[in-house]
Image (cartoon, rainbow, N blue to C red):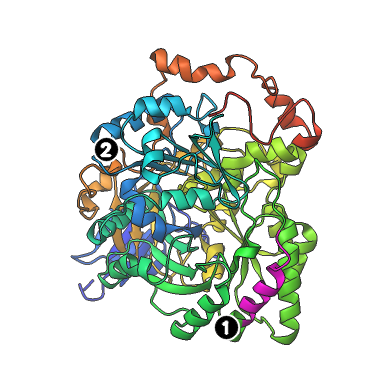
Amino acid sequence: MAADTAPDMILHNGGITTLDRANPAPQAVAITAGRFSAVGDAAAILPTAGPNTRVVDLAGRRVIPGLIDNHLHVIRGGLNFNMELRWDGVRSLADAMAMLKRQVAITPPPQWVRIVGGFTEHQFVEKRLPTLDEINAAAPDTPVFILHLYDRALLNAAALRVVGYDKSTPNPPGGEIQRAPDGTPTGLLLAKPNATILYATLAKGPVLPFDYQLNSTRHFLRDLNRLGVTGAIDAGGGYQNYPDDYKVIQKLAEDGELTVRIAYNLFTQKPKQEKEDFLRWTGSAKYQQGDDYFRLNGAGEMLVFSAADFEDFRVERPEMPPEMEPELEAVVRILIQNRWPWRLHATYDQTISRALDVFEKVNQEMPIGDLHWIFDHAETVTERNLERIARLGGGVAVQHRMAYQGEYFVERYGARAAEATPPVAKMLEMGVKVSAGTDATRVASYNPWVALYWLTTGRTVGGMRITLEHNTLDRETALRMMTEKVTWFSNEEGKKGQIVEGQLADFAVLDRDYFTVPGDEVQDITSVLTVVGGRVVHGAGDFSRLAPPLPPAMPDWSPVRSFGGYQDRRAAAPAKGAFARAVARCCDAACGVHGHEHARAWAASSPAGKDQGFWGALGCSCWAF
């Protein structure tokens, strides 16, 4: 075939999953000008190759549409990625602490060592966090900040000195600085019930200069590509100010260096000024402005601070204040008037119910119509409210937060309550618009395969089964939840998410077959070849020579240089030596609070507060205090 009409790339000799029910398993795929141009028989497609066509022999490997995360704090995560030591995937506290010590040794003053979410104590074989004494011993002089989910942060003495917390520092609203008997801060910060104190403290640390942030974002996007991610919806975030904190991602978009397609939402910045934010933004920006790589997706996930029910299953459910409804109504009216979709963070059914009251009221006067509005998270949403969401034309974006917090949910509410939290199978059965994501990088890891593992096995990263089998998903359905079903949430249906002629050529070639590996191994899958718009953005193994070059992580002490991002849990060696024995001592004997009767508590249907043999609110007495 002539070079000017031949495809740019052809894939063949593998297992190609298109998610197109009319053509589910073709023999070959051709790509031309960034789109799938032919999907069908190898005998028909291979002869179309020209002299410049890259013909990829898959050697039996599985190909899937590129994964799309429905809720990822990718812009904020990129700005900070090169400064963060990731414990995502690490399976022993001994290994995690060894990483910390190595990083402390090369981190120059005044920089911090930051471990900012993406892990849970339950993923460690020791089933606990490091103690403050252990952290101080590992880092006597270098500031260390460790964020654990949304519930707490651990700071060593050096970090406490840098942030200025002392006996006279008051507790902020919704947070607690734990203190010794003499009033001196110990280094433990608790979210009670919201995480403002954790984020405000983290924001006191140094930031990278602009050029380093460009490099940092590129490295984060490449690690997402390594996991098969080709698209994401950015959900904004606290301390992510528009437009200032969007300059880096905008620069990469202008320079053609984005390797993940990003649809971004605008997150209100200050309490009691939410209406002003959205009036300003809807007046200066247009919904869907941008292109297929970087485009405005609407408002949220924070619309008003009074509606934010931060999930921390170690404490009681927060009750939203009475001003929630009038403040939310004022913002929703602005969004409907300007035809902006929105997403609203809502963990609990009680919050969802009150928000729906507002949406239904406004809809009577200002019809919502076909705006693709959604609730995020919705762990405890009821069937009644799912029906209300469907009637108003909304959707639900779920994430794998229960994979990281499932043990805490069970401790507080009982195993029976966790059996369908969130009720994903019921949402699909009812025809509710629903898709999946991660809510990374702080409350959970950005690894989408952990989400697929959780959706299909019902297990946490700690291995605990929380979802009953009939509430889990088969692997194809779960895969659709992170590909084609996400496109409704960014109003891009039919444009991507499947391997179909005419759609954007975003796909991943996997290192093992998602459909045949044992369930536990789903979380270990990576991509050996990731392509976005027909352009190779990641290659490994046999495809490493196709990978575009990436400059070293900046600065030269970056944890990414030594450790990369998400850690391969299979690579960790068994813990050895005195330190391993010390960190394992937690569960060697009964603690003074509940005698470690975890099994009974996990099997109980009663909430922790009603089960006197178990104290689930803050965990055992040997845990990080």
Residue at 71% x, 45% y: name it.
Answer: 316
- Which residue is identified by label 2? 562
Q: Give the range drawn in magenta.
A: 320-333
Answer with mark 2 or mark 1, whichever residue precedes in sequence. 1
Q: Is residue 325 found inside the magenta-colored segment of the image? A: yes
Q: Is residue 446 left or right of residue 615?
A: left
Tell me the residue at 44%/42% (across/down).
525
Mark 1 residue type: Arg
Q: Write down the residue under mark 1.
A: 339
- The percent coordinates of residue 479 (x first, y second) are 54, 53
Q: Main secondary structure of the magenta part?
A: helix
Q: Relative to 112, is 174 on the left or the right? A: right
* Residue 42 seen from this side: yes
**In this rendering, is residue 130 above or below 83?**
above
Q: In which quarter of the image is residue 407?
A: top right
Three-letter code for the amino acid on which mark 2 is drawn:
Ser
The Cα–Cα distance between marks 2 and 1, rounded to whole angstroms, is 46 Å
